[in-house]
Structures are given as C-alpha cells and as structure tokens.
Amino acid sequence: MAEWNFCPGPSRIGPMEEIHIPNDATYAPFSLTDVIATAPLASRLLLGATLPGRVLSAAAMGMYAGSALKDWVSRRDVRWVDFQREFGCDVRTLQSMPNAARKDEIFKLALRLSEGFTDERIPRAELAVAVNGHLTEYIAGITGQRVFTSSEVREFTLAKLVFPFAMGVCDVVSGDVALFRDTGIFEPHVVCHEFVHRKGYWKELHAQALSYFALMSSGDPVLVQSALAERLHRQLKVLAGDDHEAYHDLVDSLEMRSELSEELHALRPDPGAYESSVSTVMKKVYDERLKLTGQNGLSDYDEGFTNLLWTFSRSGRARQEARQAAI
C-alpha cells in the first residue's frame, strides 16, 4: 500500500491560553430541543393531559437556555480565525475554479485515495474524541488559543425528519450534534464539520474548510482519507450538478477501488417518496436561510468549499501555507 503524503499543519506549540466551553446540553440523555417540542403532545397521548408535558418542556427549556448562556459567556473571549487574512479568501472573495481544473483534480484525488486506501474504522465515540482533539489543535495553531468543547455525538434528533437529506446536524445554540446514519469513510469529516459549528463557527464554508484542514494535518490515515474523499465528493457534485446519472457516471469513470466507488455511489441513492418530497422543500428553505445569514447558500458545501481551496492555493496574501490545499 502506498504511503500517505501528509499535508503539513500548523506547528503543535506548548502552553497557551485555554478556553473551555461547557456544552452542558450535549451531556443530557436526550436532545433538549426534542423534549421541548414533543413533551406536551406525548403527555396528552400517554396521560390524557398536557400539563405534565408542559412542566417537563419548561424544565428542558430552562436547561437549554442555561446551557446556551454559559456557552455564550465562555465564547466572548474566543479569538476567531480570520479567513481572509489566514487563507486569502472568504465567503465573498472566492475565485471560481475552472471546470477543466475540477476534472483534472478528481482524477488526482481518485488516484491518491486508491493508492492510500485503508479499511480501518474507528468506533464513533473514540473517533469523536480524536477528531475534536485535532480540530482544537489546528485552530490553536492559527489563533494561539485552545478552545475545548464537548465530544458528545447523538444518533438521533427530530431534525432528521425535517432534514432527511442531511448526514448530521448541529444546534449552533446548544452545540448538540447528531449523526443520522453510518457515513462510512466520510464519518470523520461529518463529525469534524459539526464540531466546527460547536466551537462557534456557524458558516458552512468555514465548517467545511476547517474540518478539511484539521483532518489533513492530523497525520492519521483514516482522517486524511475522509478529508480527501469529502473533497472528491464535493467536486463530483459541482461537475454533475443535479444530474443523478451524470454523478454516477463520473464516479465510474474514475476507476477507483471498489470500496471507494461504492461509498461515493451510496451518497446519491434513489430517494424514497418521503425523502424526495421533503428534501425538495427543505433544501430550498435551508438555502434561503443560509443566504439570509451572509452565506452563498447550499453551494458553500461544495462549490464554495472547492473554490476556497482553489483560491487559497493561488493566493499570494494568505498567512497560512498554500500547500495545505495541495492534493
């Protein structure tokens, strides 16, 4: 098996300022937002009265608000990554990557992934701790400040019913993170992406980029593989657009190891009737919400992310080393 050519990250430096964000809500046995939303109805169905449910819902709301307030207070002293300064670009200053360059890149990524393939899987709880540690260190290498957050991950919240197209979700108010299914080789990236949100970065472009750079700088073959697979997946989505068949044809054209091509094919299954109808509506709603919060929309997950890597690699003003965007 070929050795991974690890992308260097920031130097691991010693003692520095530390900030601990409690994330108390993430340690609750159930999602507090689920309890708030469903307790009155469940109480009516099971007990024939809504009062007990309302009391429980109010208690959960108090815990939720208290946890959010503690996290907000802790974040006041956080030094945030300045993307324009560090990477030479941000949401509004991205350069469009030419399609010819995208096509060239997918074959380079496919080759590197096939040559360095590992079938090792890390249990989710252990993976979450490892990913959180690498993310904390990567950001600290830029800001000079270690921001510690929870490594808890749930397997279900009601958000799955609202966003059936999502692999995972983070409540940016409470920091609660849930993964909705086994995401295979992509799981380290999905976890890391949501953990970036937990640390307080609410823009999707920032979550995509920081997750990628943190995993690539980790030196762990499983995490590096996940980052590269995510990069490949996003390039394929840009090239194929909404054409379901074109996406699968592109995957087949790469002639990758069967394990890798199967994972990529699995990301674009034929949706069921519920997923198809709900996803169509909610994607439009979510896209508009992102635009209203100063983002480019759902495109920041793929086109924006790959444009950031392209722009960063060609920037002469970025403080970070551009080789972090190399394949």
Image: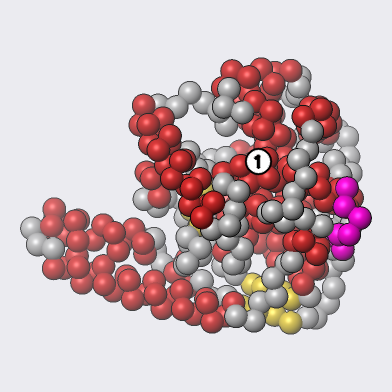
Taking the spot 61% from the left edge, 28% from the top edge, the residue there is 241
Q: In the visual, does 294 lie left or right of 156?
A: right
Give whichever of 30, 162 is nearer the camera: 162
Percent position of residue 216, x then y: 78, 50
Q: Is residue 325 above or below residue 130?
A: above
Q: Name the residue under label 1.
A: 302
Residue 28 sits in quarter: bottom left
Residue 327 image offset from top left, x and y in percent:
85, 41
Q: Which residue is drawn at 89% across and 59% down?
A: 317
Give the dominant element type of the magenta stretch: helix, strand or loop. loop
Helix, strand or loop under label 1:
loop
Which of the two residues, 229 or 92, is positioned nearer the viewer here? 92
Task: Depth check: give the residue in front, 287 or 147.
Answer: 287
Q: Nearer the viewer, residue 176 or 320?
A: 320
The magenta span reads: 314-320
What is the number of callouts on the image? 1
Q: Is residue 297 above or below residue 104?
A: below
Query: Relative to residue 166, is residue 28 drawn left or right?
Result: left
Q: Mark 1: give few (<14), some (14-19) or many (20+) Cα within 10 Å.
A: many
